[in-house]
């Protein structure tokens, strides 16, 4: 299977938010105050279509297979801009879901932060996630970053092994929306 990685386009909204949701389902349910997959996809789609948000198409790359299907995505951004990029999410949570939650910061800045990595179930285990991660790390290096960081759920040892295999080191443990995560990072 041949995979091509390209910047996401606004028109990819019909696939990418579903992939993002797979990577962060419980967190999104906390954001929208309900366990409703369709509403969660709607929430992520609104943010994906907007510029200057955490989950914007501007911050996303997609993996494309030989049939031109999107089979994975990775979203990342300048960690120093986290609060600015998070504000549209907080505004949407408050306005449409009457949710005043202000989630903990996922990054302390001074790094390119990978927010979500997701691979379609039909190609999981075939290297697509590794390909996406290598691509976004190379992208961060080209942009002049000296570190790339991400969070890994303590309850996801397979993801932790993947990140470690790619050179990410274990950082401190943090709490985010009631879950426990490790910050992992790679120096460039």
Image (cartoon, rainbow, N blue to C red):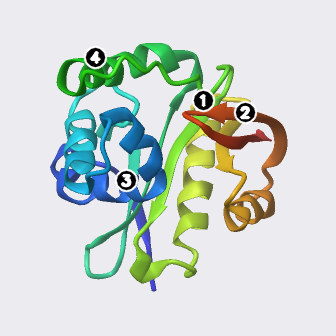
Query: Pointer 2: what residue?
Result: 174
Res 106 label:
1
Q: CB atoms at circles 2 and 1 under 8 Å apart? A: yes
- Residue name at image x 51 percent, y 77 percent: 124
Residue 123 place in picture, x, y as percent: 45, 80
Q: Is residue 170 left or right of residue 46?
A: right
Q: Residues within 10 Å of mark 3 (few under 14, many from 20)?
A: many
Give the CA distance from mark 4 to mark 3.
Answer: 19 Å
The quadrant in which the C terminus is found is top right
In the depicted view, which residue is nearer to us: 104 or 76? 104
How far apart marks 3 and 2 lie (CA) works out to 21 Å
Q: Which residue is mark 3?
A: 21
Q: Which of 112 and 155 lies nearest the eye of the viewer?
A: 155
Lower sequence index among marks 4 and 3: 3
Quadrant of the drawing holding the N terminus: bottom left
Position in image of residue 79 (x %, y %): 58, 24
Residue visible at 84% across and 45% down in the picture: 170
Query: Sequence order check: which comes first, mark 4 or mark 2?
Result: 4
Q: Residue at x 33, y 81 (%)?
A: 66
Precedes in sequence: disc 4 or disc 1: 4
Mark 4 = which residue? 91
């Amino acid at each position: 299977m041949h995979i091509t990685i390209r910047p996401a386009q606004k028109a990819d909204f019909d696939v990418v938010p579903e992939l993002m949701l797979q990577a962060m389902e419980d967190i999104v349910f906390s954001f929208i105050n309900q366990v409703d997959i369709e509403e969660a996809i709607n929430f992520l789609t609104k943010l994906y279509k907007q510029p200057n948000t955490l989950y914007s198409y501007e911050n996303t790359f997609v993996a494309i297979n030989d049939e031109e299907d999107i089979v994975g995505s990775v979203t990342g951004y300048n960690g120093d801009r986290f609060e600015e990029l998070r504000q549209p999410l907080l505004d949407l949570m408050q306005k449409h879901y009457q949710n005043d939650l202000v989630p903990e910061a996922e990054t302390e800045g001074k790094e390119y932060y990978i927010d979500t990595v997701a691979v379609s179930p039909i190609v999981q285990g075939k290297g697509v996630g590794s390909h996406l991660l290598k691509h976004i790390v190379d992208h961060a290096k080209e942009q002049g970053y000296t570190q790339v960081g991400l969070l890994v759920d303590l309850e996801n040892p397979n993801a932790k092994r993947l990140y470690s295999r790619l050179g990410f080191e274990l950082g401190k443990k943090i709490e985010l929306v009631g879950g426990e995560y490790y910050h992992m990072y790679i120096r460039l």
